[in-house]
Image (spheres, rainbow, N blue to C red):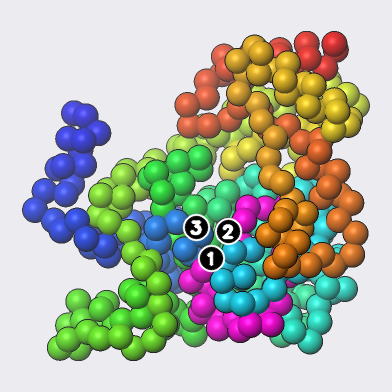
Amino acid sequence: MTVLDTLSSLLDGAPWIGDGPLSRRCEAMIRQQLGAQHAYLTPSCTSALEMACLLIDLQPGDEVIMPSWGFSSAANAVVLRGAVPVFVDIRPDTLNINERLIAAAVTEHTRAIMVVHYAGVCCEMDDIIEAADRHGLEVIEDAAQAYLSGWRGAPVGMLSDMAAFSFHDTKNVRCGEGGALIISGSRLAQCAEIVREKGTNRSAFLRGEVDKYTWVDRGISGVVSEFQAAVLLDQLGRAEAITRRRRALWDRYHEALADMEGAIQRPSPPVHCRHNGHIYWVLLPTGTERDRVLATLRTESIKASFHFVPLHSSPAGLHYGRASGSMAVTDDVAARLLRLPLSHATTEDEVDRAVDGLRKAVRI
């Protein structure tokens, strides 16, 4: 049976519009896998972050503290509300937000902290939550890369007020485009289904709670089609196996490169973090060396790459946001980081070939 046959059987007789029975099955599976109270499928992690910023009622002039080492979606979600992203530097070991720098970035305008769990490795959430509680701030997790990662035994997504996940084609669990917003507690969840349904009470109407639905608040177009949900349902059913496979490939890289420490820097996830093997990165000694090694690997058809241009130094970041303190670690990492091939299609042979290629390139 082909993938299209499977999708047709799942969708046979069912509506293809958003928030249908397959979407609800996906949400139930996400709740079960994460231990979440509330899960809402969204068209992307970007839309989930936009929902989160709308739900906390960000206003023009408000500030949200976040790392500069991340994708534009996090900053865009803030900027679209007229608020200001305030960038702080990252840790040199995990490349996550440096929790010790958060307090110095807080002003009278700060409303929230948005963290990014880079490469599926969780931030130091105990310190971040403590800082948020001390200053009366919301915490939003950009967990785009971190589905089924964990922190001190708790799943990522259950560590804050809200968490946004991605099911983009580049992620471990994928449906082409897609995401989810996880909400802890009922305070924000009461508004989430209205926001997701373009500001209407359509969900209540479909449950028979009102006799017609209408526009009741602000909202976005935040549901996914049943076609996307059918793909995601299969992926979620295999999420644990997918994660084990990614971790095995990550471990293969890590063990094979152990004797190269000094020539490169390998990742060092903390022991209390259960990462999901999303990305395997190394740091070369200099930016010039990284560029040379990357070019060499590409001549061998090894699909290595760099990663983000830091948000604080991007054109939009300079226009809409501001940096709090030095961004030296972020700038340094951006220049020296090299990602090795790791995707749903990566094989053990490709890992070994990438390791051999890196060894040869570094020795040149």
The CA span between labels 3 and 2 is: 8 Å
Mark 2–mark 1 Cα distance, whole angstroms, equals 7 Å
The answer to whether residue 1 is above or below residue 35 is above
Q: Is residue 102 left or right of residue 315?
A: right
Q: Earlier in the sequence, mark 3 or mark 2?
A: 3
State whether residue 128 is above or below residue 138: above
Give the quadrant of the C terminus: top right
Instruction: Look at discs 3 and 2 and give the one toward the viewer.
Output: 2
What range is drawn magenta here?
49-74
Residue flagged by tag 2: what amino acid is it?
A: Ser
- From the viewer's side, name the closer residue of 106 and 126: 106
Residue 162 appears in view: no
Residue that numbered label 1 is attached to: 49
Looking at the picture, how far across and down is residue 334, in whole percent?
Answer: 78, 42
Q: Residues within 10 Å of mark 1 (few under 14, many from 20)?
A: many
Q: Whole-percent x and y of residue 210?
A: 20, 88
Task: Give the left or right position of residue 103, taking residue 46 as reference.
Answer: right
Q: Label 3 amino acid?
A: Cys
Residue to which mark 2 is pinned:
73
Can you tell which mark lies on residue 45?
A: 3
Q: CA distance from mark 1 to mark 3?
A: 6 Å
Circles 2 and 1, Cβ within 8 Å, touching? The answer is yes
* SS of the residue under disc 1: helix
